Amino acid sequence: YFEKTFEVYTKLWKFQQTHRSILENKSNYGLKRWEVGEIASKIGQLYYHYYLRTSETNYLHEAYVFYEAIHERQYFKDILEVKNSALMIKKMRYYARFIIVCLLLNKDENVRQLITELEGLIEEYTKSFKPPDAKEWQMVLEEISTFTEAEKKLVPINLDRTPDKIEHRLASNIAERHIAGLPKLKLQEAILVGNYQKQIKFSELTLDMYRMLQSLEREPFVLHPSVAAATKNKSTETSDKTKEASKDEQGNPAAEKMLKRSNPHKYLLYRPSLSQLLVYISTAFKDTSDNSALLLYLSADGFGANSGGTIATTASGVGSMTASGNNAASTNAASNAGNVSNKDTSATTQHLADHHVSPPSVHCLHPADLVPFTRKPLFLIVDSDHSTEFKHMPNVFDQPVMCLMSPVEYPSSVQDKSEIGSLFTLFLHTPLLGFCSVSDIGNLDQQKWDECVRKIGAMEKAIGDMLLTDPSVDQHVKRFMMDDFLYYFIVRFVLCGIFLRYHSSFKDDKVSLSACQIGLSCSP
């Protein structure tokens, strides 16, 4: 259906281009500019959804091409004169979608301009129509403003007071790694879960999910002609030209490699219930092929097993993960992770009864819930104040299983995650930003920033080479490191541990640093 819909809208667009003068004639159809804009907006929306389906960032660029053409040509300019609230809502939705696309492409100036324009539209909408959903639109505006401000806080500024330019995605020219005797492993599916009660978000995308999403994508390259010609005379015959470009590239090995490059397919889950999460994990597990891996990123509050919310010293431990589907209080966040015990079930049950400890919640995720999915390579990133509950998750099928766990406690000098997002996730996304955050570095000219990026890159390469060549490193780790995305997560996890261990703010013994679970047990 998607391809058919796309084909229909492409034909419709070409038809209105060819017969625009006839269609605009009032004696015939009387086509309005906003109707043309609506078609272009729908095509942009289709490209955006195709990006979500394929994780190919070039489709995101195509969505930007259409949205920007609408903005430049002011297709929705005359909507206010029509005095139609439904059309105003369509225009504001277009702005919200355009902002998301610009955010994902890191076009900060565009985002700031669009937010200002959207603010004016919401004000005009409220004043003209006095609608019942005025507060909802104000909330949308507040969310995106808070989101962009939080992201802006972390970026050091130049001497001219402009933010440094930062690369958020993986470069497309990374050298492949081969290890004799080990079959190649590739990250195929990724599930990103945002479930903190207090978290910065826009729409259903949290700040931490936004960072992880970009960490799982390669930098776009200009392949589609419409992207290459993304100027004032943007072509909108994208579909046909894309097909022609693909034909032209056949027979060119380098171009074919670029065409076949793959980002992992992603599921973005904002505050899912346990049943929803398990359904998505099952689906991703089913779609994961041989010699491929599934990544599960959990960003969530911990949830205590007993009524006081503290960890029982002898009962099963508790961790984090998903919102309850039934309990209103639980829906605020929580996920629960029971520590897998070596004792038999009856002994554990008797122990809980004797000590009057509440059993783990049935509405929360436990490490044991993930054991069935370890039949295939599974890579976990747990960012939670109960992350270490996953430390002893068993590997019963002898498949590669690895878990990167966040610190469970941070020093008071570290900014609250509700203001800047998680420090742990930030390190996995851009280590230099994480270092600047804990070191309170707010001013750094672009030249120094670029020099620091090169040094971090050299450190990442050194760590990667050491892990791959060290015979004592688990073979499962080396298999995961054959994938570009997992390679950088592992290397940056080690780098995060190094930075934090030697940083003066983390010298306190009470501060728990990152932990790593590989197979049965391991730590960096």
Image (cartoon, rainbow, N blue to C red):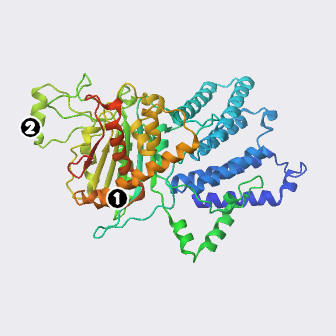
| Viewport quadrant of the N terminus | bottom right
Front tag of 2 and 1: 1
Q: Quadrant of residue 381?
A: top left
Q: Secondary structure at mark 1?
A: helix
Q: Is residue 253 above or below residue 458?
A: below
Residue 56: percent from left, percent from top? 54, 57
Which three-letter amino acid code belongs to the residue tagged 1? Asp
- Snapshot quadrant of residue 512: top left
Name the residue that disc number 2 marks: 347
Mark found first going from the N terminus, 2 or 1: 2
- Residue plotted at (77% across, 44% down): 75
Q: Which image quadrant for residue 125?
A: top right
Could you tell me if residue 524 is visible in this image? Answer: yes
Give whichever of 384, 479 is nearer the camera.
479
Q: Is residue 442 left or right of residue 332?
A: right
According to the picture, the residue beneath numbered tag 1 turns out to be 465
Circle 2: residue type: Ala
Q: Residue at x 45, y 49 (%)?
A: 455
Of the numbered discs in the image, which one, if any, rests on residue 28? none
- Left/right placement of residue 77 relative to residue 443 reads right
Q: Is residue 112 left or right of residue 149?
A: right
Q: Residue at x 24, y 23 (%)?
A: 307
Whole-angstrom CA distance, mark 2 to mark 1, is 46 Å
Spot occupied by residue 349 in the image (x, y as percentages of width and height): 12, 35
Question: Observer-nearest residue: 485 or 265?
Answer: 485
